[in-house]
Amino acid sequence: MLVGALTTLIAMTAMRQSERHSVGKFGWLLLILLSPPIGLVLFLFLGGRKISAEHENREIVQLPTHASIAGGESHPLAEIAVTRGLVAPSDHNRLRVLLDPESMWKALFEVVESAERRIYVHSFILIDDRVGQRLIDVLCAKAKSGVEVRLMIDGFGSFTFPNGLLESLEQAGGYCTRFKPLSRIAKFAYLNYRNHRKLMVVDGQQAILGGANFVEYEMTPTPDNETWVDFLLQVDGQAAQQIEAVFLSDWDFATEQESRPPLSKLTTSVSEAQGNELASEDRTMMQVIPVGPDGPDEILDDLWLAAINRANDRIWIVTPYFVPPPTAMRSLEIAARRGVDVRVIVPESSDMPPADVARGDYLHDLTESGGKALCYPDRMVHSKMLLVDDQVAYIGSANFDMRSFFLNYELVLAVFDQTKIDELATWYDKLSDQCIDDPVEKNWRRRLLGITARVFAEEM
């Protein structure tokens, strides 16, 4: 009894350090009460946000600024990000949305093969498949030709990627690193704060980014029924140099303890010539938003909740994992009750069964409030988007779950261009037409599983 009381007090004290995000704490408290010593050890190892000193002390990445914003800072949602320390949106960009596996494959290798000076690549997941092998081959060829090549992969997501392929790139003259590899798992923070970003930047002028990892089951010239539904973004112009700054910051952070000097910092302003050659009809207003310890604290929570609460007509979400924070869930329910068209598309069965169980209770509550829960059958949907009215589309690597809100490094673009918002809305409509209503079974087993998963939602 004494041990149980002491460990419960210790756990409650630790939980108070992150009271703002209370979901999951009841589950840990229950586990600690039932098995005090084991529960406390598990909580200290797995519970909470587990931010280590090096993440906590990391400064906000310095994105290059630009003079021409064409009124973008007047958008209220853009102003929130600016007041939090990010750069105002720019319209000196061309945005192409790559909506199918073939176009993603083609654009990825066209961009990397066009490099003349430098290529920077990061992928959360990279595996030894056709995409991974060809990417390494192209990067090796570029490195041998004198192009500066740097490849970074996440130490957890790409845990199985062979060291031999990385060594072949090093031997060709390129540089490789793993972002916080699992060999350092003794530092508990590395279970969280994974680098979930996917990006490629070439010569500081072209960028590929989004939710799709550079793997064959997401991008391929020969898709089949097993190929995931996802998309990438191709950006030319000023935003590409800002995305490059994010990579450089991550690279220096990941390699600071290695025996290699940090990369030289970029200048603090982008060239106004970059993007000036674009015709006005080709320009897309967008804002680069780094999410995580190198971005403003909880910026995704601020922006997405503000956008949801401002919605008048529609809130359209597509995400592979729907495990939102309680404030976001409450905002969606209120929006649905006041007549906003709130839709959430998820895969009928994702690659993460625990997340599928956890989402059930959230989707049930959403439909009870008047929203729509739609399931895409047969194939994995890995796309990520929040589209609000005709105001903004948030697209990138962030899922609508607690890990993306609070526990991962993510990269998101806020798109304020009406043409691109319409293009994304058309794609979403077509995806909706292929979905089925979520079969919300109101039986006690599903509800019990959903509630049980919900109290541990923060850890999923």
Image (cartoon, rainbow, N blue to C red):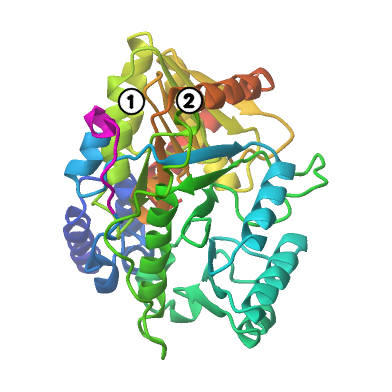
Q: Give the extent of the magenta segment.
A: 65-77
In the image, what residue occupies the spot 23% across and 64% down?
Answer: 59
Tell me: residue 219, above or below residue 147.
Answer: above
Tell me: residue 331, above or below residue 397.
Answer: above
- Which label is found at residue 198? none
Front position in the image: 290 or 329: 290
In the image, what residue occupies the spot 67% across and 40% down?
Answer: 380
Q: Residues within 10 Å of mark 1 (few under 14, many from 20)?
A: many
Three-letter code for the amino acid on which mark 2 is drawn? Ile
Front position in the image: 113 or 321: 113
**Residue farthest toward the top in the current orientation of the protein:** 339
In the image, what residue occupies the spot 52% across and 50% down?
Answer: 209
The picture places residue 274, in percent across and down from the top left corner, at 42, 50
Front position in the image: 267 or 173: 267
Instruction: Please state the total of marks drawn on the protein image.
Output: 2
Question: Magenta segment: does it hold 324?
Answer: no
SS at mark 2? helix
The quadrant where residue 342 appears: top left
Q: CA distance from mark 2 to mark 1?
A: 16 Å
Question: Magenta segment: does it hold 71?
Answer: yes
- Relative placement, left or right, of 446 versus 163 is left
Magenta region, main secondary structure:
loop
Observer able to see residue 258 = yes
Three-letter code for the amino acid on which mark 1 is drawn? Ile
- Name the residue that disc number 1 marks: 308
Tell me: residue 16, above or below residue 420.
Answer: below
**Residue farthest toward the bottom in the current orientation of the protein:** 259
The picture places residue 74, in percent across and down from the top left corner, at 22, 29
Observer able to see residue 443 = no
Q: Residues within 10 Å of mark 2 (few under 14, many from 20)?
A: many
- Which label is found at residue 421? 2
